[in-house]
Image (spheres, helix red, strand yellow):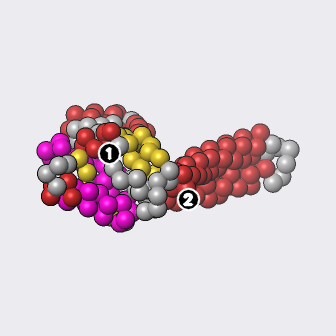
Amino acid sequence: MATARVKVDDLAVGNLPRICAKTGASADGFIDYESGHGGFQPWWLLLLLLGPVGLVVVAVFLVFGRRVNRVGGSVPLSSMALHRYNTAVRVSHWSFLASFAVLVAGIAASVGFRDTWTWAPDLGLVGLVAFGVGLVVTITAGVITGRLWIDAELDGSGRWVALTGVHGVFADAVETRYRQASVDPAR
């Protein structure tokens, strides 16, 4: 994967080469994109499980965390790249929900039927193992999702955006476009 440095204005209006940013093939169209840097992170809510200490840590993160550094615009993408990404997101979400449902059902069955079925306590263990497997699938799909997407970070001047995780062909096309624009005074 490569990095393409683009002007904020070009990203905002989709003035980029019609080459898929992920596959390097011809792009079917543009998708709206917004980076997710800075600000509140959902995983911080897990810190609340630590009680008052977790609440203090979340407050410190909110006060001293990175400033919100979001940037958005339109990125050229092929339908195949978008389909791959959406599939990975669906697998991640559904695997977590399914494994959590099996865990709850296993625990409920082991508690509810412990007097009736001799093997009922094993259902809680089965639910716990299924949850563990589902968690591994969820984490793996999350890692794959991250690799299938583009990350954008605004530079210090606020005029340029570094698009990381893009295909080399797209990065070369962007560089060529800016090089030609700086040489040709008519552009």
Seen from the viewer's position, the closer of residues 49 and 135 is 135
Q: What residue type is labelled 2?
A: Val
Q: Name the residue under label 1.
A: 15
Q: Please tell me whether residue 108 is drawn above or below residue 176 in the rendered image.
A: above
Q: Which of marks 1 and 2 is nearer the N terminus?
A: 1
State yes or no: residue 173 in magenta.
yes
Q: Please tell me whether residue 117 is drawn above or below residue 165 in the rendered image.
A: above
Residue 92 visible? The answer is no
Q: Which residue occupies 33% across, 39% down?
A: 13
The image shows residue 82 at horizontal and vertical percentages of: 52, 51
Q: Which residue occupies 31% across, 53% down?
A: 163
- Spatial CA distance of label 1 from label 2 is 40 Å
Image position of 118 (left or right of 175)? right
Q: Name the residue under label 2.
A: 136
Quadrant of res 125: bottom right
From this viewpoint, which residue is outermost toward the front? Answer: 186
Magenta-colored span? 151-179
